[in-house]
Image (spheres, rainbow, N blue to C red):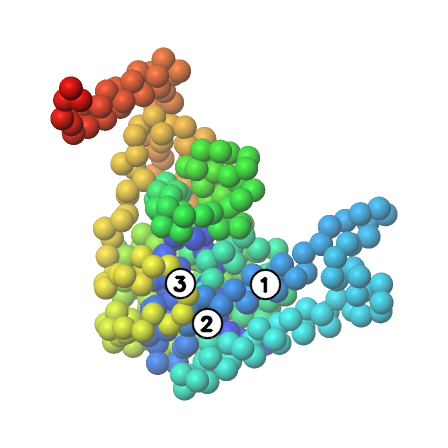
């Protein structure tokens, strides 16, 4: 890249701390990072296609190419549309730069690379897989639905924790590769909450922006939720590490079931190996079920005698 792009894109698995990053970026006096716009997700889905007979691309790009409209002109038009909206939002805040964060964008890394790869700076956020799995379960219960990007995983793996573990592994594998770009920086959630100022100084140095000591205070002084986003992230009033390690408090048998899915990648991300364990046997699972039912029946209030 000959010069620094104006735009900043935050990528990370949902419930990885991307809303925290959004608030901190938005607190910088030169950067506007509003609530989730879904612009990148929409543009990524717009160019999705599939290969049919003889390798023909069956989708927008293939259809327009057959009509003499070059792929580059389509991608440029999409990019211009999205950037113009984000520039308007930044101008409304009186700031010269924009940043965007929509957590589900991380499911469309190939398309985002294709449209935006050389035209923005990227902040790639990762978090411990078991913590993400637990937080996604909480998020799904709050939404009372699965976000569209998780549907395929839930269809293949009916147990939610297993489905979320596979989603985390797939997305995080892509994020690690994406973070190797010269115009990307990798941020681990755990490092950020353990030492906010050094990590933020590193981040803003990468972005070419001066460090402002008031950023952290400003981020949590703002009462305006500024659009759609993670309800839990908006409810946070400080940078803290309270939710770090929650996944390791799952039952040992559950961790053992998820370990083959997340374990090798956790070590690639710099996390300690998971403790050895084994899933419950069928007999153990039945005994656990029976004990749970017995405990629930004992806790039931005793009603009046029907007689």
Q: Quadrant of residue 130?
A: top left
Q: Position of residue 263 (x, y in %)?
A: 42, 35
Residue at (36% x, 50% y) in the render = 142
Q: Nearer the viewer, residue 36 or 123?
A: 36
Q: Position of residue 122 (x, y in %)?
A: 49, 64
Q: Residue under circle 3?
A: 229
Q: Nearer the viewer, residue 279 or 158?
A: 158
Under circle 2, the secondary element is: strand
Q: Nearer the viewer, mark 2 or mark 3?
A: 3
Gap in angstroms between the C-alphas marked 2 and 3 = 14 Å
Q: Residue under circle 2?
A: 99
Residue at (79% x, 65% y) in the render = 64
- Quadrant for the C terminus, please: top left
The tag earlier along the polypeptide, 3 or 1, is 1
Q: Residue under circle 1?
A: 42
Q: Quadrant of residue 299?
A: top left
Gap in angstroms between the C-alphas marked 3 and 1 = 16 Å
Residue at (49% x, 56% y) in the render = 104
- Left or right: 235 as drawn, with respect to 166: left
Q: Position of residue 237 (x, y in %)?
A: 23, 64
Q: Position of residue 154 (x, y in %)?
A: 51, 39
Q: Which mark is residue 260?
A: none
- Left or right: 193 as drawn, with respect to 98: left
Under circle 3, the secondary element is: loop
Under circle 1, the secondary element is: helix
Discs 3, 1 touching: Cβ within 8 Å: no
- Residue 265 shows in this picture: no
Mark 1 surroundings within 10 Å by alpha-carbon count, few (fewer than 14), some (14 through 19), many (20 or more): some
């Amino acid at each position: 890249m000959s010069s620094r792009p104006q735009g900043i894109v935050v990528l990370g698995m949902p419930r990885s701390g991307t809303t925290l990053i959004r608030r901190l970026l938005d607190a910088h006096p030169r950067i506007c990072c509003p609530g989730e716009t879904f612009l990148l997700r929409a543009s990524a889905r717009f160019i999705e296609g599939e290969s049919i007979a003889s390798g023909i691309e069956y989708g927008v790009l293939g259809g327009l190419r057959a009509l003499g409209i070059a792929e580059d002109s389509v991608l440029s038009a999409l990019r211009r549309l999205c950037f113009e909206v984000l520039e308007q939002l930044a101008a409304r805040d009186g700031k010269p730069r924009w940043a965007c964060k929509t957590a589900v964008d991380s499911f469309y890394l190939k398309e985002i690379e294709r449209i935006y790869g050389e035209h923005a700076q990227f902040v790639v956020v990762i978090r411990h897989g078991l913590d993400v799995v637990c937080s996604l379960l909480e998020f799904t219960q709050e939404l009372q639905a699965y976000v569209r990007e998780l549907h395929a995983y839930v269809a293949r793996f009916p147990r939610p924790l297993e489905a979320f573990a596979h989603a985390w592994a797939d997305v995080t594998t892509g994020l690690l590769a994406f973070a190797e770009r010269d115009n990307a920086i990798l941020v681990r959630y755990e490092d950020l909450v353990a030492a906010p100022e050094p990590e933020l100084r590193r981040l803003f140095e990468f972005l070419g922006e001066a460090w402002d000591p008031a950023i952290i205070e400003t981020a949590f002084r703002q009462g305006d939720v500024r659009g759609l986003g993670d309800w839990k992230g908006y409810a946070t009033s400080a940078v803290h590490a309270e939710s770090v390690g929650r996944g390791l408090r799952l039952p040992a048998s559950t961790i053992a079931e998820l370990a083959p899915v997340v374990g090798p990648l956790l070590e690639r991300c710099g996390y300690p190996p998971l403790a050895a364990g084994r899933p419950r046997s069928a007999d153990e699972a039945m005994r656990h079920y029976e004990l749970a039912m017995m405990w629930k029946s004992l806790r039931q209030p005793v009603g009046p005698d029907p007689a």
